[in-house]
Amino acid sequence: MIRDSKKPSKAAAKTLPLDGAAKRATKTASAAKAAKVSGAKAGSARPAAGKISPAKGLGKGVIAVAPPSFRRERALIKKGIWPVAGCDEAGRGPLAGPVVAAAVVLDPKRVPKGLDDSKRLSAERREELFEEICATAQVSVVSASPERINRDNILRASLWALTRAVHALPDLPQHVFVDGRDRLATRCESEAVIGGDGLIASIAAASIIAKVTRDRLMCRLAQQCPGYGFESHKGYGVPEHLDALSRLGPTVHHRRFFAPVAAAWRRIEGVPAELPTVSGDLFDPPAEAGLAATA
């Protein structure tokens, strides 16, 4: 059989030299393949864009969360807007005790280190930061009593306390960041920030002030109303508290329209009872805390 000399065989085709364009295409394909293999091997050490990698040293499955920053406050200061406050409340969920709101204007030159959402801090660390915030910032605290909560509902009572706290600051701020969805009816610009206590330093500071103040108030209430365990659960609806409600009945410091308390009232309805009570100034902020003034 005569072979066409112009058409190379399959074996010969494999060894034919490549022209310049073919060489470049082959080189590019090889580089892409190598990069793909290298990326697959390094995938565990290099997370995809937009994903948060586990914090080094915290163990598998633990996500690193950036602490609140003072960036938003500084951005407003650069625009000539000052003072800038943050406000937050503590105690919306409990069955007893007040809801406490705090407003804080941090000193830009003395922002305490370690500020965070009060729920992410230990009790000891909250106490330390509480003292530092009070010593370096403008601080005010207002509480809404159980009577106001019963009358207005918890949301309205909380917003009332937050607004009063802002207006109680020594210097009325020009801008206030408030944790949550609801803006405040203040005489200054109000900006609601969902999850603000974990994002904005001023709100984080306010959350610490509100939480520590309320915890101290509930410990004082525990001394006046023994048996309820207020010193440990701070009025939240834990089993110990629900058991005390069943045994002892509600006090005047319980929120009458919260479901477990309403149920306890229904059980004793029509039966005269001496309800534990305390002096009317229990829910005033402790004078020794120096909450209405600044350093």
Image (cartoon, rainbow, N blue to C red):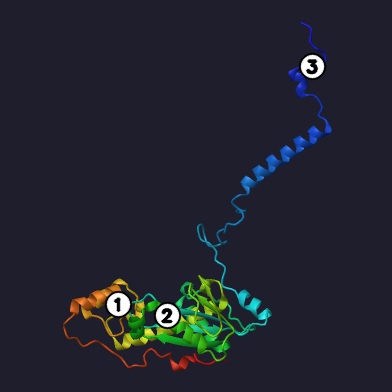
Q: Which residue is situated farthest in the left direction here? A: 271
10 Å crowding of disc 2: few (<14), some (14-19), many (20+): many
- Which of the two labelled residues, at mark 2 and mark 1, occupies the earlier sequence position? 2
The numbered dot on residue 158 is 2
Q: Is residue 190 left or right of residue 284?
A: right
10 Å crowding of disc 3: few (<14), some (14-19), many (20+): few
Q: Is residue 27 left or right of residue 127?
A: right
| Residue 91 visible to the viewer | no
Q: Quadrant of the C terminus?
A: bottom right
- Amino acid tagged 3: Lys
| Residue 263 visible to the viewer | yes
Residue beneath disc 3: 7
- Amino acid tagged 2: Ser
Measured from the top left, where is residue 85 in percent x and y? 56, 82
Query: Between residues 111 and 151, which one lies in front from this camera angle?
Result: 151
* Disc 2 to disc 1, C-alpha distance: 16 Å
- Amino acid tagged 1: Phe
In this view, the mark in front (1 or 3): 1
The quarter of the displayed image where residue 5 is located: top right
* Disc 1 to disc 3, C-alpha distance: 94 Å
* Disc 3 to disc 2, C-alpha distance: 89 Å
The numbered dot on residue 257 is 1
Residue 170 vertical placement versus 179 (above, below): below
